[in-house]
Image: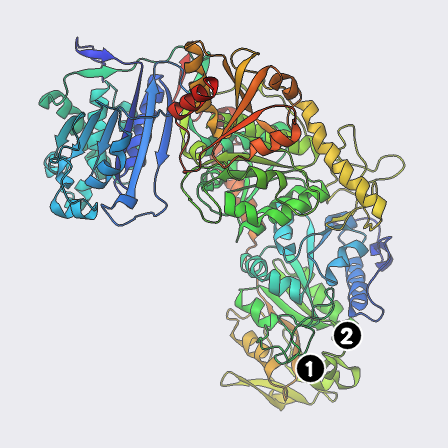
Amino acid sequence: MSQTHEPDVQPFESVVIRFAGDSGDGMQITGNQFTHTAAVIGNDLATFPDYPSEIRAPAGTRPGVSGFQVRFSSSDIHTPGDQPDVLVAMNPAALVVNLKDLRAGGIVVVNTGQFTDADLKKAALERNPLLDGSLKGYRVLEIDINKRVAEALASTGLSAKEVQRCKNFYTLGLMYWLYSRPLDTTLKWLEEKFAKRPELAEANKLAMQAGYNAGDIHEFFHGRYEVLPCKSLPKGTYRNVMGNDATAMGLVAGAQLAGLQIFLGSYPITPASGILEALAGYKEHGVLTFQAEDEIAAICSALGASYAGCLGITTTSGPGMALKTEALGLAVGTELPLVIVNVQRGGPSTGLPTKTEQADLLQALFGRNGEAPIPVLAASSPADAFECAVEACRIAVQYMTPVILLTDGSIANGAEPWRVPELSELTPFPAKFLERAPEGGFLPFSRNERLARPWARPGTPALEHRIGGIERANLTGHISYEPENHELMCKLRAQKVQGVRDSIPTPEVFGDERGELLVLGWGSTFGAIRSAVEELRKQGRAVSALHLRHIWPLPNGLDEIFANFRAVLVPEMNLGQLVRLLRSEYTQHNFLSYTKVQGQPFRTSELTRKILAILEQ
Amino acid sequence: MATNTTLTKKDFKSDQDVRWCPGCGDYAILNCVQGVMAQLGVPRHQLCFVSGIGCSSRFPYYMNTYGFHTIHGRATAFATGIKAANPELSVWVVTGDGDGLSIGGNHMAHILRRNVDVKILLFNNEIYGLTKGQYSPTSPQGKKTKTSPMGSVDRPFDPVSFALGCGATFVARTIDTHQKHMEQVLLAAAAHKGCAFVEIYQNCVIFNDGAFETITEKTVREDHTVDLRPGEPLVFGKEHDKGIRIDSWEPRICAAGEAELWRADHPSPGAAFVMAQMDSHPELPRPIGIFRDVSVPTFDSGLHEQIRRARSARGPGSLEKLLHFGETWTVS
């Protein structure tokens, strides 16, 4: 369709929309479609899906509310935004749960068709928020979407239930109209999605068109808005990517750069299942996926596959990580490459399965019996998960070690534009299998300059050897209970992992190299920290930011960076885990902890307030 | 994978000292396995022995092949990964009643139902040996051990019934002291394309000596066991005069001439289950030999077949295409 440029189209730099409804209302699809269209237009964007762990909590209740927040912008952004500018509420529960987040003066689109007394009761509301003044100070748009969709789809012959399932596309059409978006990306998606049910594709198209036309016809709004493409992103080809998909692609790329076949042993768990699902679809890349009977079999099969010459990978989330602990120790002891992805969620135990948290850091660093050091990396955003997955493969293969990659729920399901790397930008790190016994005989636990041991695959003549969980004698790998040998092997394994730091860069400070306060982050807090520091620097504050990708071993040069600031603030979505590590590793610096464990990411405004409070002390 | 050189039993002995207790049944099993390996015609580098934890699990260290001594109960999961990564390998799991049926029971069930082409040797001594004598999931009810001073209240597993229930495609039982029988059973297991489960009655000389004596002792063995040989009648006894027939789903002793003709490849595992039930009837001989041997596609071949199919339908995967999948836009 042609882009209209009517005089009343007002440009905005950045807009945040939150779609909220019942978990069966299709809000995640709606949000994803809006995101996809924004990506194709060329906006910078960030998303925050927030949904309950129940697949279908009782309809209309507050625990059943599913939300999808998308921020799209003509400038470079790092977070999905603190406060929505627009809230689309499909029922009373969605309205009351989300209204507190809406910015003052923001737009609320309410589906009045779902505001009967029964609906209010389901949402535990004694009074109707549309009538009791709750919406004062907002621009409210009341539409009976149930009725409008029923009218628009009257001639389709679909059942009333099927018709009502198209409501989300009505709201999508309305938002497309309001922000001057083309419909074609979603139209194409509907055709592909419902290729086998063309009547449903048609119905959803009609609903979307009806919503779009409603903007024109009914003059609900005072005018339309637009958010122009973002031109400040680095040059290149972009696509929209979600964190789990970026992780999966990074693993495929990493294995290819190593010249290895992937074996993924995994067990479905929220929010990590998406990686297994994605990799299961990459069979033409030679990816072997094994949906194991449990988390333990998942990692054990992966380690077995690594022993046999594949790149063994396992993906999980917190509780699954706990179950994998013993096998991690074996991977450390047998010195085989293995990549473990932990998509962190709220813990402990089952905790908050669909919510985000960073509380598995100390588990990743120390959660094993014995001296069992493992390199640990963390991705900072959905797109960064690609590079981190490649990096995890590199370290695993070059150092013959398990590597833990931490992402989290907000990265896994969040989306952002990703500059697709040219293949020439990716440096290969080919795995080298020992093919014959070296002169003087084969020693399975001899070491190269990185202290990595040789990788001799079963199937290779003359290299038959045995490995296992009992301490291995230096060089030969035979069972050894010798006290000195055990200490030597513990030290060698630790030194090898420490040596990884010689292959990683010192992270760059964002802002001045010297100042009052350095805000140090890891993982998905990157966006909020960067946004807060950018904002405060614009106000002339002496604050800088630093982000860690490699958490163990810590990169070289941090000591010197920290020395240039009076204090280092460490915001984390846990009760202060990285800060403990930093305090023990860099005893002479002043680390301040700022924590949040609500299953929700930091807001930029929370960080700016905290930073200002410190600066003004 | 034939080789030019003929291998002997000696070629499969590793340079490590064998450290089981003197008189342990494991020695006899190791000896037999080494002999069987020499007969298989599989080169040493294509053989991989995988174990968990327990006395039996030291086994790989004593085999001059590839070997992986893993963690308690998980050998079958490791073996699944190894076989999936390289289906050319001949992969053998060595486990025990505790390792394979207690801590590793879950993985055992799943490797059997998936029919991963791996051979599993379960050394059953009805006791925890490495931890010095606690009752195991195959110890008989009432068994007095260090952790069951008044006798175990647990009802035991029958490994054969367990494997049959999991849909195992090859199930057999043999005895540590019966080298000839063990050799035949192991050769049949090796010849089976798919997951082979072999329970081996193994005597723990220290903590459960004589557990199977009434069945396996040489002077009584022929009268107290019946060998399930596919295609042959279920005849037993020193004089080969007795037989077993199945009568209304019950095994009964009969004259040799009336004995049931044993079939291990019947579409239904029903008869195999009836045989397995004989364990709980002391008046009946204990069945050994091959309970089940059916042909079913293996997990590992299915896994690789899907890769071949995907590649022939979509071509070999291109990383560039993968990264650019879906709609893209350019910032210039």
Residue A402 percent across, percent down from the top left: 65, 38
**What residue did someone put label 1 on?**
B225
Q: Splitting the image into 4 quarters, where does residue A142 fall? A: top left
Give the residue at the far right of this rendering: A440
The one nearer the camera, A316 or A142, is A142
Q: Splitting the image into 4 quarters, where does residue A410 fall? A: top left
What crowding class fits label 2: few (fewer than 14 Cα within 10 Å), some (14-19), or many (20 or more)? some
Residue A403 percent across, percent down from the top left: 62, 36
Q: Residue at x 80, y 69 (%)?
A: B24
The residue tagged with tag 1: helix, strand or loop? strand
Chain identity of mark 2: B
Q: Can residue A159 be seen in this view?
A: no
Mark seen at residue A434: none
Q: Which residue is drawn at 31% across and 23% down?
A: A37
Q: Residue at x 79, y 85 (%)?
A: B219
**What amino acid is found at the position of numbered circle 1 in the picture?**
Thr
The one nearer the camera, B107 or A335, is A335
Q: Earlier in the sequence, mark 1 or mark 2?
A: 2
For the N terminus of chain A, which image quadrant? Answer: top left
**What amino acid is found at the position of numbered circle 2 in the picture?**
His
Mark seen at residue B178: 2
Residue A389 percent across, percent down from the top left: 56, 30
Q: Can residue A315 be seen in this view?
A: yes
Q: Are discs 1 and 2 both within one chain? A: yes
Residue A46 percent across, percent down from the top left: 38, 25
A185 sits to left or right of A246: left
Chain identity of mark 1: B
The residue tagged with tag 2: helix, strand or loop? loop
